[in-house]
Image (tube, helix red, strand yellow):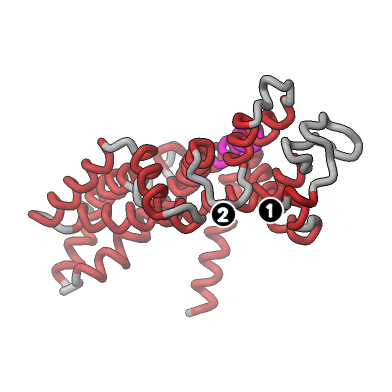
């Protein structure tokens, strides 16, 4: 039985890859993401963290790109290229975990609101609507200011303020799944709430959750960069804190275009890559977008 299950999973992954590689934009996005993740993981092996210390900087202030510093230096003489590499670890780490937290909250609330009826569903949706109408960026900025500056608080601030749209999406899908005949048969056979939600609803909404998570990571990276630019930093170098440093030390007025352009392009490239992958996953996992009916 186990061998049959693994064969089915292997065949399913094969079909998924065949469909995904037809999405050229998604493949390009996956390549960019793979490169960004590899650089972030290998940075401690190819670069010493001590170079981020301003007291050990060896370059000139706002030095333009050269053979010694391929992307120039910042206001303290540190290599912008090295800062980008170390900053990718912070930006991607916060982006992934904040999106994961957001999707967990949104999925749990969405499934519960779609499965249960009456006061529980109404109460969950009113809370969801409350988070939807609040400006998430302002709320995240307030939370990060109250809780203090650290990676955990930034992740928490982004995650708890960005789950509402996911909850509404998952709730709509849950209602569609529970309208199917086999759900009624499961209830007639004595299946409980937990069994229905975990064995029937969750597997059916999982593709939507996966595709939406990819898009949510892009939003989380933008949110982290925005919060860092506004001053809610973790104390570590990130792409957003680099942009803030470029603004505070007048990189634009001093003509230090490399200090502004480099982190900005990294943010744009990674966010675009996540968006391309998310759209490709949505097209592959959603049979309506493939033009295939189940």
> Which residue is under mark 1?
40
> Which residue is under mark 2?
93
Query: Can residue 259 be seen by looking at this rendering?
Result: yes
- Who is closer to the viewer here, 3 or 133? 133
- Who is closer to the viewer here, 213 or 200? 213
- Which residue is drawn at the image coordinates 68% and 29% (left, top)? 261
Q: Do the residues bearing badges 1 and 2 touch, measured as CB atoms within 8 Å? A: yes
Magenta segment main secondary structure: helix
The extreme front residue here reads 55
Magenta region = 265-274
- Who is closer to the viewer here, 61 or 275? 61
Query: Can residue 25 be seen by looking at this rendering?
Result: no
The extreme right residue here reads 67
Element type where label 2 sits in the image: helix
Q: Is residue 66 left or right of residue 177?
A: right
Element type where label 1 sits in the image: helix
Name above or below for residue 27 compared with residue 121.
Answer: above
Which comes before the other along the chain, label 1 or label 2?
1
- Residue 169, x across and y down, in percent: 31, 44
- Residue 139, x across and y down, in percent: 34, 42
User: Which of the numbered marks, if any, corresponds to residue 268?
Assistant: none
Q: Is residue 273 magenta?
A: yes
Q: Is residue 246 magenta?
A: no
Q: Is residue 206 left or right of residue 65?
A: left
């Amino acid at each position: 039985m186990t061998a049959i299950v693994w064969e089915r999973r292997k065949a399913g992954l094969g079909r998924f890859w065949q469909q995904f590689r037809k999405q050229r934009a998604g493949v390009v996005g996956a390549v960019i993401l793979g490169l960004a993740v590899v650089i972030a993981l290998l940075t401690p092996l190819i670069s010493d963290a001590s170079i981020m210390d301003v007291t050990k900087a060896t370059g000139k202030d706002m030095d333009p790109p050269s053979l010694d510093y391929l992307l120039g230096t910042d206001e303290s003489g540190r290599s912008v290229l090295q800062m980008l590499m170390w900053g990718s670890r912070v930006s991607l780490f916060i982006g992934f975990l904040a999106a994961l937290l957001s999707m967990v909250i949104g999925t749990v609330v969405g499934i519960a609101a779609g499965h249960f009826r009456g006061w529980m569903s109404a109460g969950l949706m009113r809370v969801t609507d409350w988070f939807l109408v609040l400006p998430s960026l302002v709320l995240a900025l307030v939370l990060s200011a109250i809780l203090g500056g650290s990676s955990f608080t930034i992740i928490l601030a982004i995650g708890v303020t960005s789950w509402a749209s996911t909850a509404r999406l998952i709730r709509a899908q849950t209602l569609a799944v529970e309208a199917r005949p086999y759900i009624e048969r499961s209830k007639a056979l004595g299946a409980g709430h937990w069994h229905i939600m975990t064995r029937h609803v969750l597997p059916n909404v999982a593709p939507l959750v996966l595709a939406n998570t990819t898009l949510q990571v892009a939003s989380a990276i933008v949110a982290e960069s925005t919060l860092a630019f506004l001053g809610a930093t973790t104390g570590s170098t990130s792409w957003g804190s680099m942009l803030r440093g470029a603004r505070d030390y007048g990189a634009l007025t001093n003509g230090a275009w490399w200090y502004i352009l480099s982190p900005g392009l990294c943010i744009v490239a990674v966010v675009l890559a996540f968006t391309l992958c998310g759209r490709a996953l949505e097209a592959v996992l959603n049979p309506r977008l493939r033009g295939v009916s189940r």
